[in-house]
Image (tube, rainbow, N blue to C red):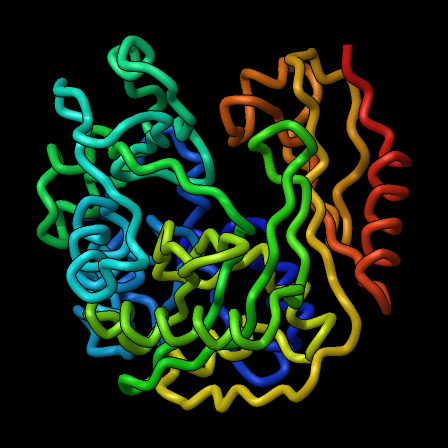
Amino acid sequence: MLCPQQRDYQAVRAAGLDNRYRVRFAGRDLDSLDSFDPTALLAEFAELPADGVVGTKDRSALLAALVAERRGLRSPAAQALIACQHKPTSREIQHCVAPETTPRFELLDGRPPSFPPPWFVKPVIGRLSQEARRVEDLRALEEIAETGSYRNGYGQISELAGLPVESVHGFLVEQFVTGAEVTLEGYVFDGRVTTIGITDSAKYEGTNSFERFEYPTALPPERRRELAAIAEQLLPALGFDNGFFNVEFFVPARGRALTIEVNGRVASQFAPLVQAVHGRSTYDALVRLACGEDPAWAPGPPNGVAISYALRVFEDAEVVSVPEANGDLEVLVRPGLRLSEQGTNDPESYRLAIFSEWGETREEALARCRARAAALPFELK
């Protein structure tokens, strides 16, 4: 498992993978590093014994694909991951195979978009909701500029996979769409697309910041079948095989669902939810797949509802003290710095922590989440 994030360690333990595999964690989370040399990392990883290799973030997944290609291990092709991660490429392919499910889009190139506002603007290479925003007029569109160094590190890796560094810069302007926001997760094994499940996203009221993710979805069966059918079109068209993926959709009350993103990696934040509801972790299936085995996902009916909850605040502050991270509690800030000086955040809010809860009903799971969030001893000033 290359360049692991903290939740990878917890997910591996929770899935009991150490009982059946020798799991080696190699390298550091790239998001924790100011800079890195991907060529040196590839050379380091090439020497480690492995029957399978995975990464659970976009950059580490791309590194894993490059390592796998060099060593003849089962993995999505690096070019397929580029096709997912580089938004202009992904949108072009989506539009070719499923135009009715693809919102209008153009590169931000100094000219007014050919479709009217409001627009949704996002980096051509990005993570989470960083630098993504709704834009109402041309003046605001002209003021958009890149911030942060994420895309520079990505470009160093993608260049090794054939995507020029200059291609990772810039922004995509999309048609602003609305509806229920959901994520379908699954995998492809030997060309066969398997859907694991669909997770609903819910935002803090009056904002564009995610409060929670609920599994399984509340969508009716016909909508779930529609989303699975779209995924079965898109993944082969992207050249994606032998790996985990997740597809983000907007589902309006009426009309076809619209595809927002295709991510060529496991949805790591949702792994505890799937395990709580189905009794099997997506990390179990991820490792089986990387080792060349058919994950054979057939968990049966869901048991209850699980929620991943993101505790956020909407004003900057200095962090005085935080609770201890343990179990499923991920603490995303540390004392001694302002919120704006740390963490990965959207333009509106600051994340403090992530955790998950289960309940027999959706209402019970949400009540547990909010009660736990209120009790967490963060001190901000």
Q: Camera-side residue: 93 or 65?
A: 93
- Furthest residue in direction front, as rendered: 254
Residue at horizontal 18%, vertical 36%? Answer: 106
The image quadrant that residue 362 belongs to is bottom right
Say which quadrant the C terminus sits in.
top right
Residue 325 locus on image (x, y percent) = 75, 43
Residue at horizontal 79%, vertical 57%? Answer: 357
Residue at horizontal 33%, vertical 76%? Answer: 232
Q: Camera-side residue: 353 or 368?
A: 368
On the rendered structure, is 348 left or right of 117? right
Residue 137 locus on image (x, y percent) = 33, 15
Residue 190 locus on image (x, y percent) = 29, 87
On the rendered structure, is 169 left or right of 185? left
User: Where 142 falls versus 235 (above or below)?
Assistant: above
Residue 241 locus on image (x, y percent) = 27, 76
The answer to whether any part of residue 203 appears in the image is: yes
Say which quadrant the N terminus sits in.
bottom left
The answer to whether any part of residue 51 appears in the image is: no
On the rendered structure, is 298 left or right of 104? right
Residue at horizontal 69%, vertical 69%? Answer: 14
The image quadrant that residue 104 belongs to is top left
User: Where 369 falls versus 50 (above or below)?
Assistant: above
Q: Camera-side residue: 100 or 374?
A: 100
The image quadrant that residue 283 belongs to is bottom right
User: Where 379 falls versus 268 (above or below)?
Assistant: above
User: Where 256 falls versus 92 (above or below)?
Assistant: below
